[in-house]
């Protein structure tokens, strides 16, 4: 696998079922290119969260093949998943902050798990909390924070390790439109400045227009459609998102 | 949040695929909820360790008692000259002593003086033991060069029977065999108790670790998704297990030793020679001292296996 291909996420005829139920996702075949900005849309129950779970390595597929950063996820031993997960940043729909840790310690978690020196952690987390405008809430624990504040802590935690890919599940679902736009600008900045691949799941169609260069994948009853050619190669002729192979 | 993000200041993890160090100290303390094994577990471990210490001390004391009781008798043989006529008894005894002295493997032969015999029997027979009214067999103590087994007894008996009839030969250790058997049974009982209590300790730690893990499952899942390895998660859990097991073991060890000391004082007050042989020596105290350490190790191993099995079920 070449370096340029190593940044890809490739799904090949992937299906997912829970137990003996019918498949919730069927025949998914697509490639995510490094530095691209993707929206994953679809009605509630379309399978967005299930697809994201496979992307952030919380779920293995029932069939098909997935390659991420050049590695086969289906056959990869469980012990090697952490090193892949550290290259991802995830904003969960329900934030999934650790309730007894302060905002500071929540944001610091990925760095501490990666064994980063504590001095560097202090500096990086301080900067990150500045960035999301929560320096004054560094010592607050999630139960005492508003939904918007928790959202920003979750985002700060997702991006502090400079992930290769950021995955966000309905990140604007709990904030007002103004804050939603700010969050989106933040993701764009990460995409443009660092080249992070961004995948945002949303059912808010207005959001899609806010990022003009974005690619849209639409899920309907567990099947993907491709309204902007996101699933084709190359995904588009120019811009950072066009950084496919070659 | 309108200013550009200072992402250039954030530490780079790209390309670093090596296993990270385990979180240490305060960093580790901030990963999982503090004191998850709270509740009765340190106390349960303390009680169980105290029981093991007492049972082990009892077993060791019984072993020492048995060893001490049979130490002086293991190579000794008694020869009784059973003859009612005093003169004939004396001549038979003298002949037996002479014969015994020449038998291979016999290290020492001593004809027990009649006065000594009478003194030994006086508590049972009264002053009449010294009179000629009650004929008392002559007694010869024979010390062998090695432990006296049934073959030695048979060999000596055969050598004497041909020349001096009417003698009875016994290994002195045989007199204590029923006592030794009883002591051995008690030692096995003590060992069984130690094994059972160790099993109970492991079961208690298994339950506590499983419950603690179930209580922190959501957090563990978040940690996993943020890139924590099983080793990291396990290390944080085991740190707490180790701390609480150590606290319980120290307390239990102290309680057990205090109980042994009190029992020792009680038995010492009896002033019995046999009980005195059941005291604990330095090696015994070292074994007893190792019990709390073994308890901590057992708790740690049990928790490690429990957590590893729980983590195996998670992606």
Image (cartoon, rainbow, N blue to C red):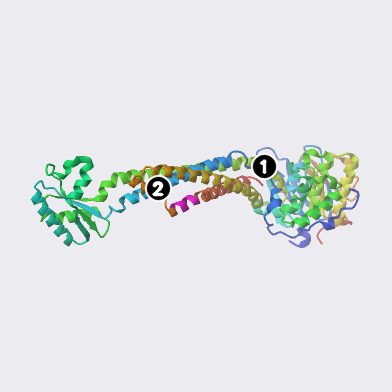
Q: Residue under circle 1?
A: B217
Whole-angstrom CA distance, mark 1 to mark 2, is: 47 Å
A115 displayed left or right of A37: left
Q: Quadrant of the C terminus of chain A?
A: bottom right
Q: Is residue B231 visible?
A: yes
Q: Numbered disc 2: what chain?
A: B
Mark 1 vs 2, N-terminal side: 2
Give the numbered dot on residue B101.
none
Most prominent secondary structure in the magenta stretch? helix
Which contiguous range is marked in magenta? B284-289
Q: Is residue A175 magenta?
A: no
Element carrying mark 2: helix
Which circle, 1 or 2, is nearer the viewer?
A: 2
The quadrant holding residue B206 is top right
B72 displayed left or right of A221: left
- Give the percent coordinates (x, y) of residue A156: 81, 49
Mark 2 Cα within 10 Å, few/some/many (few <14, many 20+)?
A: many
The quadrant holding residue B265 is top left
B83 displayed left or right of B265: left
- Residue at horizontal 13 percent and vertical 48 percent from the top: B82
- Residue at horizontal 75 percent and vertical 51 percent from the top: A110
Mark 1 Cα within 10 Å, few/some/many (few <14, many 20+)?
A: some
In terms of depth relative to the viewer, which is nearer, B127 or A12?
Answer: B127
In terms of depth relative to the viewer, which is nearer, A120 or B221?
Answer: A120
Q: Residue under circle 2?
A: B61
For the residues labelled 1 and 2, say whether their Cβ atoms are less than 8 Å apart.
no
């Amino acid at each position: 696998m070449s370096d340029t291909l190593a940044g890809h996420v490739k799904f090949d005829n992937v299906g997912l079922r829970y137990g003996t139920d019918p498949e919730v996702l069927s025949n998914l075949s697509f490639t995510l290119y490094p530095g691209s900005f993707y929206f994953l849309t679809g009605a509630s129950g379309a399978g967005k969260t299930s697809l994201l779970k496979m992307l952030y390595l919380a779920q293995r597929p029932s069939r098909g093949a997935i390659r991420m950063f050049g590695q086969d996820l289906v056959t990869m031993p469980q012990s090697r998943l952490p090193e892949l997960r550290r290259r991802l940043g995830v904003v969960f729909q329900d934030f999934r902050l650790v309730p007894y840790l302060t905002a500071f310690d929540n944001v610091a978690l990925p760095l501490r798990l990666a064994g980063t020196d504590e001095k560097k952690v202090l500096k990086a987390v301080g900067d990150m909390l500045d960035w999301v405008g929560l320096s004054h809430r560094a010592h607050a624990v999630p139960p005492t924070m508003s939904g918007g504040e928790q959202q920003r802590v979750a985002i700060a935690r997702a991006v502090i390790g400079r992930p290769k890919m950021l995955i966000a599940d309905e990140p604007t679902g709990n904030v007002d439109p103004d804050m939603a736009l700010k969050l989106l600008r933040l993701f764009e900045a990460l995409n443009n400045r660092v080249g992070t691949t961004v995948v945002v799941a949303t059912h808010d169609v207005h959001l899609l227009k806010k990022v003009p260069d974005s690619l849209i994948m639409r899920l309907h009853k567990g099947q993907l459609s491709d309204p902007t050619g996101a699933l084709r190669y190359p995904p588009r002729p120019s811009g950072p998102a066009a950084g496919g192979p070659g | 949040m309108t200013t550009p993000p200072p992402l250039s200041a954030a530490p780079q993890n790209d390309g670093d695929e090596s296993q990270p160090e385990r979180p240490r100290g305060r960093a580790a303390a901030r990963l999982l909820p503090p004191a998850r094994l709270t509740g009765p577990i340190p106390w349960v471990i303390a009680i169980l360790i105290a029981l093991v210490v007492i049972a082990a001390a009892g077993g060791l004391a019984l072993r020492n008692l048995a060893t001490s009781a049979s130490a002086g008798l293991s190579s000794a043989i008694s020869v009784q000259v059973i003859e009612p006529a005093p003169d004939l008894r004396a001549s038979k005894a003298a002949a037996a002593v002479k014969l015994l002295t020449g038998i291979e493997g016999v290290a020492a032969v001593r004809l027990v003086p009649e006065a000594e015999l009478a003194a030994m029997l006086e508590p049972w027979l009264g002053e009449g033991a010294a009179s000629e009214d009650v004929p008392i067999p002559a007694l010869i103590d024979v010390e062998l060069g090695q432990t006296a087994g049934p073959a030695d007894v048979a060999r000596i008996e055969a050598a004497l029977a041909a020349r001096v009839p009417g003698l009875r030969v016994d290994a002195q250790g045989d007199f204590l065999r029923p006592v030794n058997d009883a002591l051995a049974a008690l030692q096995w009982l003590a060992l069984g108790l130690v094994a059972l209590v160790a099993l109970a300790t492991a079961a208690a730690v298994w339950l506590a670790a499983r419950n603690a893990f179930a209580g922190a499952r959501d957090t563990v899942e978040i940690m996993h998704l943020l890139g924590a390895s099983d080793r990291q998660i396990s290390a944080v859990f085991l740190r707490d297990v180790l701390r609480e097991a150590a606290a319980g073991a120290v307390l239990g060890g102290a309680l057990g030793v205090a109980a042994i000391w009190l029992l020792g004082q009680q038995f010492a007050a009896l002033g019995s020679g046999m009980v005195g042989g059941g005291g604990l020596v330095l090696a015994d105290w070292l074994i007893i001292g190792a019990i709390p350490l073994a308890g901590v190790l057992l708790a740690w191993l049990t928790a490690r296996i429990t957590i590893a099995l729980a983590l195996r079920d998670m992606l």
